[in-house]
């Protein structure tokens, strides 16, 4: 074969490879947008139907279980994708072992949340909802199939399953509103959602001529996976605590001072605002993912270019914060009243404060590029634990006096320390602190450094 022919073949392979990954990423983006839109619309109807108090009870139960979600994931997802790519011949052993580990994690989660629920002497309805939501976690081990599809660059297949799952589970929840179902049925929806996902993934897996019945457990592989994943379990627990603990602590602390119904309503107002702000969090993630290859290449080629691209990314994140948060701060209250009704006016005020949180969310997402390229995973574990610990401490201090507003300031304070200040105490991370400051302080200088 001539040199020209070889070069032509290589160009064709690169083009086909680009198209393959582009299609994969496009489907994942479509999946994210469909799920975001569907879940947001469904949440609006559910929130209006339940009202602040019942909506607060439901979100208290889901957050109570959600704190421990890392026990079911066991930090295995990214590791599993990596090893499925490296050792496709060990597919059944890897999937089977990961499924067993996740099932063990679900058992620990279930026992933990039920024991805590009884120790807290929660009312019967909350305990029943916690039981149902925690029971859904026993189905998650089968969802390891999703990681198999990602390892095969078949995001299209995973996206289709996720979209169908979202549509069916959202339809189920809307159906509950139509028939005027009681609160507990909305906890059953978590089991329905997970069941649909499992059935969808197993059907798609079978469509490739494969069967979960061929999965095998290996003690040696289990020890290998657990050794790899234990830091990620702690990291995940810390992140989930920082994300979910506010709703639980608002309910627990205010229940002792203002009563059960008022505490539940406060959680409902807070949760409505939180869901709206979380819906805006996907944009920075997409931007950072699209810039990641250019930053990684620069890290390998030219240190100055690498620094410029990181600073430029921080500038972009700050601009996104200004574009979204400034209008949201002033329009949050009328938006929440329009979407959820007059009884959620307080949630509008909370949403205006949550707009400030977007600054820390954007910068934290952008900072992940630095952590990944510098392989500072132990450092990220420290920041997550520090952030979670500080968040809990500040909640105890602020919620009794300032209620939901105190929880928001506690979250903002913990983010300020874990995303910014902790950098100053670690030599390897200290340069990133100054790059973030430079990006924020010179955001108008954003430029193309590609």
Image: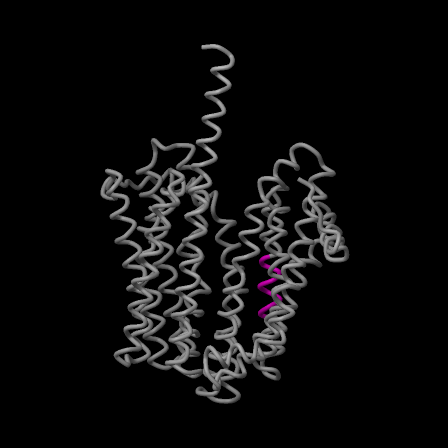
Judge from the rendering whether residue 294 lies leftward or rightward of residue 13; answer left or right.
Answer: right
For the residue pair 382 and 282, the one nearer the viewer reads as 282
Judge from the rendering whether residue 15 lies leftward or rightward of residue 423; answer left or right.
Answer: left
The C terminus sits in image quarter: top right
Asked whether the viewer can see residue 121, the reply is no
The scheme the figure's colours follow is one colour
Query: Where's residue 218, x and y in %?
Result: 33, 39
For the residue pair 201 and 135, the one nearer the viewer reads as 201
Query: Where's residue 197, x and y in %?
Result: 31, 56
Instruction: Write the residue at 61% across / 47% down.
Output: 369
Q: Is residue 5 above or below residue 261?
A: above
Query: Where's residue 98, x and y in %?
Result: 36, 45
Instruction: Write the residue at 34% across / 73% down.
Output: 129
Q: Is residue 9 highlighted in magenta?
A: no
Judge from the rendering whether residue 121 lies leftward or rightward of residue 450; answer left or right.
Answer: left
The N terminus sits in image quarter: top left
User: Which residue sits furthest top?
Assistant: 2
Q: Is residue 387 highlighted in magenta?
A: yes
Numbered label tally:
0
Magenta range is 384-392
For the residue pair 284 and 232, the one nearer the viewer reads as 284
The secondary structure making up most of the magenta span is: helix
Instruction: Write the residue at 71% across / 39% down.
Output: 305
């Amino acid at each position: 074969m001539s040199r020209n022919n070889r070069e032509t073949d290589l160009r064709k392979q690169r083009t086909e490879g680009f198209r393959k990954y582009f299609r994969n990423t496009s489907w994942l983006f479509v999946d994210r947008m469909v799920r975001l839109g569907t879940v947001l619309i469904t949440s609006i109807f559910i929130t209006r139907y339940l009202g602040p108090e019942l909506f607060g009870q439901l979100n208290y139960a889901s957050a109570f279980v959600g704190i421990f979600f890392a026990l079911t994931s066991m930090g295995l997802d990214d590791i599993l994708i990596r090893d499925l790519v490296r050792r496709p011949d060990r597919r059944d052993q890897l999937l089977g072992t990961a499924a067993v580990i996740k099932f063990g994690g679900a058992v620990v989660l279930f026992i933990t949340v039920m024991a805590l629920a009884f120790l807290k002497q929660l009312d019967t309805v909350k305990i029943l909802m916690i039981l149902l939501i925690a029971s859904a976690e026993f189905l998650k081990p089968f969802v390891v199939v999703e990681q198999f599809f990602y390892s095969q660059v078949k995001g299209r297949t995973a996206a289709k399953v996720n979209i169908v799952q979202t549509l069916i589970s959202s339809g189920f929840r809307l159906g509950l509103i139509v028939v005027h179902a009681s609160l507990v049925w909305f906890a059953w929806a978590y089991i329905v959602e997970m069941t649909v996902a499992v059935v969808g993934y197993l059907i798609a897996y079978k469509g490739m001529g494969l069967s979960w019945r061929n999965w095998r457990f290996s003690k040696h592989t289990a020890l290998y996976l657990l050794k790899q994943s234990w830091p990620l379990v702690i990291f995940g627990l810390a992140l989930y605590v920082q994300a979910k603990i506010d709703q639980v602590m608002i309910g627990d602390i205010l229940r002792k001072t203002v009563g059960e119904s008022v505490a539940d309503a406060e959680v409902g107002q807070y949760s409505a605002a939180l869901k709206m702000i979380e819906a805006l969090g996907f944009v920075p993630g997409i931007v950072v993912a699209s810039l990641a290859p250019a930053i990684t290449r620069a890290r390998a080629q030219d240190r100055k270019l690498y620094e410029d691209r990181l600073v430029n990314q921080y500038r972009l994140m700050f601009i996104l914060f200004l574009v979204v948060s400034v209008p949201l701060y002033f329009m949050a209250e009328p938006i929440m009243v329009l979407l959820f009704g007059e009884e959620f006016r307080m949630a509008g005020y909370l949403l205006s404060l949550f707009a400030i949180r977007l600054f820390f969310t954007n910068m934290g997402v952008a900072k992940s590029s630095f952590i990944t390229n510098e392989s500072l995973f132990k450092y990220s574990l420290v920041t997550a634990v520090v952030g979670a610990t500080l968040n809990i401490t500040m909640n105890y201090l602020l919620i009794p006096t300032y209620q939901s507003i105190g929880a928001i300031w506690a979250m903002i304070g913990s983010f300020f320390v874990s995303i910014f200040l902790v950098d100053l105490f670690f030599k390897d991370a200290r340069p990133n602190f100054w790059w973030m400051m430079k990006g924020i302080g010179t955001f108008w200088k954003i430029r193309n450094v590609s």
